[in-house]
Amino acid sequence: MTANRILLIIFLLAGGIIPPAGAWWDPGYVTDISTTNLYGIPAALMKEDPKLDKFALVATRRISPDRAVVLVGTGGFPWWSGPFGLFLVSPPSGKLIRKIAAVTSIDPRNTMPDIKAAGSGYVTIVHEDVDSGGELARRKYFFNELSTAPATSQSYKPVRIKAITRFNDSLYFTGQEGENGVIIRLGLKNEKPAAGDWELIKDISGQKLSPIVFSKIEGDGLRMYTPAETYAFDGKTWARSAGADTRYFRPQQEPCSLPMEDLEKYQELYEKCEKERIVLGDAAMVGYSGRCETENPGEYAGLPDSYTYLLERYELSARLIDISKTPLRRFFIWNSRSGYEDKPATGIYELRGNFCKFYPLPMPNNDILKRYRPELAAQGCGLNDALGRFQKLGDRIWFCKNFYGGEGQCGVGAAGFFDTKAKVFEILYSSQTAKWSCSALLAEEKTVWMGLQHIGEGSVSSGGLAAVNPATGEAAIHDVPAGISAIQRAGDIIILGTGEGIYILNAKGEASLIGPDIDEAGDHILHWE
């Protein structure tokens, strides 16, 4: 046994804890405890099966000052064959309290269990692919510390929130549970979530929901769109209608996908479908196509002229920020594959009638890279900063930056704004946000909230929630372990839609997961404590 592992076991016996295994699982992460009797667990396992002689600490999670749950593997390196044991222990005394359950890998050749969450009387185990780190299954165990009765368990799929929409006196969360769509309505009272006033909607008119792409308030109702159907709520009842709404989705088949069998007939069809391309295409929605002036005289950026498939119609319309209708003046946020000098261009286009001007997003230079990401400055990396989530507030278009952080690529994460009057960008660089891409944004007068994430090769991880001071650029980070997809304010709390459900950040800056979770009967619940 190495000195490091001996020190780690001493640390555990002294009451310390280690974090659970990472999503991208590494067999070298576990601690071999075969020659110890840590918490009395090896002895307990050998009593059950005398043939067992190899044990490893896979994960541990503290649930109170004097209690922790521990996941132990058997069978030897690389450990994922199992079987595994889940135990309740007392770190201060180093004693075993009880065995909670035996855990069997869902695929002994290629999956590894890990502790996802734990608390008084429960622990949730996830099974992850050892190559990709992707979650394959999860099960929640319920136990009584004072009882020797076997733990009960429920297998379930998490509700992953994608967006939040406010309609009347409720918040509507849209997301997925497995392959199906789901809607959660959370009632508000005095601008705060009303405990107990919520519902989870899995079907409308007796049929399961498809994953919802986006929601929009239109007229007096709330509408939720998918590529195949629309769900509508008038404040009292839900209805569903079949078919894609062509305002937001293009036909599945590109108009000019035509056979070349008959050239004369093809030419006639081509002219006909080319007109359809323009009608259905990007230029008609944006209101301009072709060359746009840039800040550099003699250089140009381009806007799409027809049917590019780079963005769906609803995505294009969401990137248009109208300043006035008559005369038409708007800004268009665009990350194009090619721009001026035939280089990829990310920035903001100003459109006024037949006039178009492109304002490129300022790229970080070497000085900025050295100051905010010194670990990358020496070796160098391919900067690929792009405009991410955005929101108009007053005369400013606030945004946060996205970038890919794997395979020699990098960026410098930050919040920033484009002044629609002065036509200038300002980037609020901070050492707190520099290494993170952005997954969600909420701009307020005194705070700009950013969901932080790392996008690497084959993995995405959460960096928490950043609260950026728009006056100073300083940022404070709040710990949120799940990836944030949407941010909404309700009174003095911040509500987050995440890959694990709904989180609430209270006025003290404390984040907690309220659910939806499941209880011992398998029913969904929200935690309001």
Image (cartoon, rainbow, N blue to C red):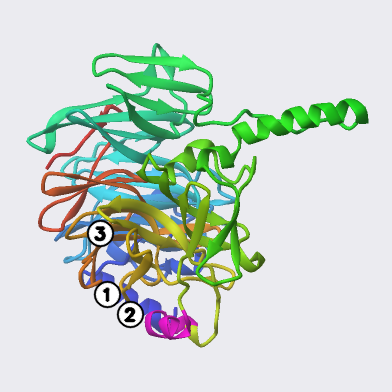
Q: 364 or 358, which is in the foreground?
A: 358
**Residue sitting at the far top:** 205
Where is residue 486 drawn, in percent x and y? Answer: 32, 46
As measured in the structure, the alpha-carbon distance from the residue carrying label 3 to the one carrying label 1 is: 40 Å
* Residue displayed at 33% across by 51% down: 391
Residue 155: quadrant of the picture:
top left
Q: Is 371 covered by the magenta stretch? A: yes
What span is in magenta?
Answer: 365-376
Q: Which residue is mark 2?
A: 7
Whether residues under marks 2 and 1 lie with C-beta atoms below 8 angstroms apart, the answer is yes
Where is residue 282 drawn, in percent x and y? Answer: 58, 41
Label 2 or label 3, whichever lies nearer to me, is 3
Residue 130 is at least partly visible in this image:
no
Q: Secondary structure at mark 2?
A: helix
Image: 440 above or below 411: above
Q: Secondary structure at mark 3?
A: strand
Q: How many marks?
A: 3
Q: Is residue 474 left or right of residue 360?
A: left
Of the numbered discs 3 and 1, the one sitting upstream in the chain is: 1
Disc 1 marks a residue whose amino acid type is: Phe
Disc 2 marks a residue whose amino acid type is: Leu
As measured in the structure, the alpha-carbon distance from the residue carrying label 2 to the one carrying label 3 is: 43 Å
The quarter of the image holding the C terminus is top left
- Residue count near mark 3 (Cα–Cα under 10 Å), binned few <14, some 14–19, many ≥20: many
Disc 3 marks a residue whose amino acid type is: Val
Q: Which residue is mark 3?
A: 448
